[in-house]
Image (cartoon, rainbow, N blue to C red):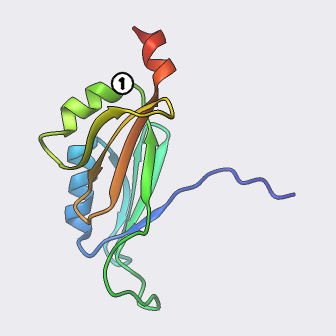
Amino acid sequence: MTKFTFLRPILWTENLEETIEFYTKALGFTLLGKNDDWHWASLKKDDVQIMLSLPNEHEKFHKIGFSGSFYFNVDKVDELWEELRTKTKVCYEIETFEWEMREFAIYDNNGYILQFGQPVEEISTAE
């Protein structure tokens, strides 16, 4: 059986430079590589990697978007909330949910929903 070893999403954008700036400035990602001819970039923060790209010419699309959200498990979710709540567009504020996750969500510059969560049990043991 094939083993899946990693998922690295490619987020489409109509403005590569603006998206690189959002992820590096607002979220602290590092730019690993960029190719202007391909309209492509690779970014990393800790164990998370994403790629950015203008849509390929063979792909048909009407508007940049995603019919879901990207969920990041983080430590220190409350600290991250304090850091991002005033410098990004908030989707929903930080809250502890019945499924024992403390989380919040923001929008990136393309309108993608980015959720950030931490299990409540990790927060309790860290204090």
Residue 33 in the image, given as x and y percentages of width and height: 38, 58
Q: Is residue 125 placed above or below 58 in the rendered structure?
A: above
Quarter occupied by the C terminus: top left
Q: Furthest residue to the front? A: 98
Which residue does the image show at 43% across and 18% down from the upper left? 123
**Between residues 94 and 34, which one lies in front from this camera angle?**
94
Q: Is residue 125 placed above or below 34 in the rendered structure?
A: above
Residue 31 falls left or right of residue 50:
left
**Between residues 71 and 52, which one lies in front from this camera angle?**
71
- Which three-letter amino acid code belongs to the residue tagged 1? Lys
Helix, strand or loop at disc 1? loop
Residue 101 in the image, given as x and y percentages of width and height: 46, 32
Q: Furthest residue to the left? A: 86
Residue 48 in the image, given as x and y percentages of width and height: 47, 44
Residue 98 in the image, given as x and y percentages of width and height: 47, 33
Quarter occupied by the N terminus: bottom right
The image quadrant of residue 37 is bottom left
Q: Furthest residue to the right? A: 1
Which residue does the image show at 47% across and 91% down from the upper left? 58
The image quadrant of residue 11 is bottom left
What residue sits right under mark 1 in the picture? 76
Which residue does the image show at 81% across and 58% down from the upper left? 2
Residue 108 falls left or right of residue 57:
left
Is disc 1 surrounded by few (<14), some (14 to 19) or many (20+) residues within 10 Å? few
**Between residues 99 and 87, which one lies in front from this camera angle?**
99
Which residue does the image show at 43% across and 61% down from the upper left? 51
Numbered-mark total:
1
